[in-house]
Amino acid sequence: MERIICVIIGYVFGLLQTGYLYGKMHNVDIRKQGSGNAGTTNALRTMGWKAGLITLLGDCFKCVFAVVVVHLIYGKTHADMIPMLAMYAGMGAVLGHNYPFYLKFKGGKGIAATAGLLLSTTNVWMVLICLFAFLAIVGVTRYVSLGSLVVVIIYLVEVVVYGQMGGFGIAQNYLYEMYAIAAFLMLSAFFKHRANIKRLLSGTENKLSVGKSK
């Protein structure tokens, strides 16, 4: 039951579509601009750096806040499984971000929300490794999609390695659930990026560009 509650908590936070709401404040429907995606990259391309940064931070920290709420609710009563419950909240936040019911289930691709989960449930070295990999790949190729896909793979590897090293401090059966969630998030990211993957393979993927600030 705790797992379901955590997913619901995460989903509710995930419904905060930062890019969509920011666009509406400026009379822009981000779902009808650029790629039609409500995430950071499209906000950056269509509305500029300010919109992109606000969208990134909003989508990232809504997952962080969901994890914080789970800690407040279950931190004392379920201390032995709190890292796993935090992962369920993070998964819920990604689902809420990707499939918001009030926008006909058309949201973002979940990368910024996943970054929020990484930030709130792992250590600084895991965060830095993912950040460096993302910046290096995007800096060299200018393909945000490629950087995002590589990072979710690295995240899965990090969760498994850190878990097996005892970093999360929970029982093995709980760790298996965490590994499954990390794998689900990776597969979800690949699914949401399927069009990008086709364009990457064909050499027609859009490179990073910045629109006029709004």
Image: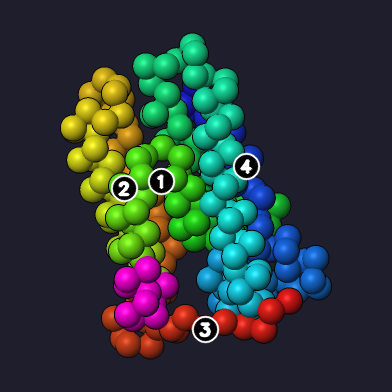
Is tag 4's residue or tag 1's residue first in the polypeptide sequence?
4
Is tag 4's residue or tag 3's residue first in the polypeptide sequence?
4
CA gap between label 4 and label 1 equals: 16 Å
Residue picked out by circle 3: 209
Marks 2,4: beta carbons within 8 A: no
Residue picked out by circle 2: 126
**Is residue 182 depicted above or below 209 in this figure?**
above
Residue picked out by circle 1: 118
CA gap between label 2 and label 3 equals: 28 Å
Magenta region includes residue 103: no
Marks 2,1: beta carbons within 8 A: yes
Q: Which element is circle 4 on?
A: helix
Q: Which one is nearer the viewer's eye here, 107 or 160?
A: 160
Q: Which mark is residue 171?
A: none
Is tag 2's residue or tag 1's residue first in the polypeptide sequence?
1
Locate residue 186 relative to residue 76 in the image: left or right.
left
The magenta segment is 135-144
